[in-house]
Amino acid sequence: MRSSKSRSRGNKNRNMRPTGGNIINRVFDSSGPDGKVRGTPQQIIDKYNQLHRDAQLAGDRVSTENFAQHAEHYQRMLNEAMREVEKAREEQEAFNRERQAERDRERAERLRHQEDSANGDDAEAAEAPAAPAEAEAETDNNLVETPENQPRPRRPRSRRPRGGKDEANGDAAEGGEPEAASAE
């Protein structure tokens, strides 16, 4: 034989209001004075308000008050659910704003780091000779080079000296032909 203690375990939560789910769109069965009214809280409120008006027109003050109280009960439930939904929405918006601000900070830090490294690369390129192409091939990791990340190419030096006495005399700076002509 079962004890009464084991039988009551399943009955604990029967009279409690539902805690989870969306109350706004949930379908309720309301046991009113004229039978059951089924629907979402807003539909039940509308039905009880209609019954309230009908009872008022019929002159039944007791039923009028009863329907008004039923409508008020569901209106309070709906208002509470709406406040909870609004609070959750505001919390989500605050969380999203905080996440966006964090992303903006990270993006600004990355840009600052890229600018610093680009400025550092320019300074290093001025001090050190350019790396051979073989070293660049070894470090290739299938990334696309962008113009911002590439060092500026150096202009090649000319082998001719700029200006001077040889040009004024008409002698070529590189060639030995005039000298050969004078040696003949």
Image: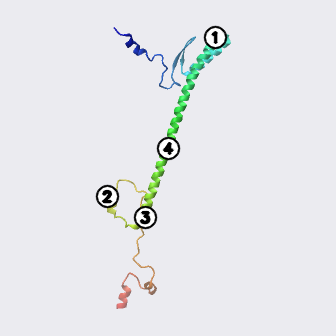
Which quadrant holds residue 35? top right
Residue farthest toward the bottom in the current orientation of the protein: 184
Q: Amino acid at mark 3?
A: Ala
Mark 2 lies on residue: 138
The residues bearing labels 4 and 1 have C-alpha atoms spaced at a distance of: 57 Å
Q: Which residue is mark 1?
A: 62
Of the residues under marks 4 and 2, which one precedes in the sequence? 4
In whole angstroms, how far apart are the C-alphas of marks 2 and 3? 23 Å
In the image, residue 124 above or below residue 169: above
Residue 100 numbered tag = 4
Going by the picture, which residue comes out furthest to the top?
A: 1
* Quadrant of the rendered image containing residue 181: bottom left
For the residues carrying marks 4 and 2, which lies nearer the camera in this image?
4
Q: Earlier in the sequence, mark 2 or mark 3?
A: 3
- Residue visible at 40% across and 15% down in the picture: 9
Residue beneath disc 3: 123
Q: Report the Cα–Cα distance between label 3 and label 1.
A: 91 Å
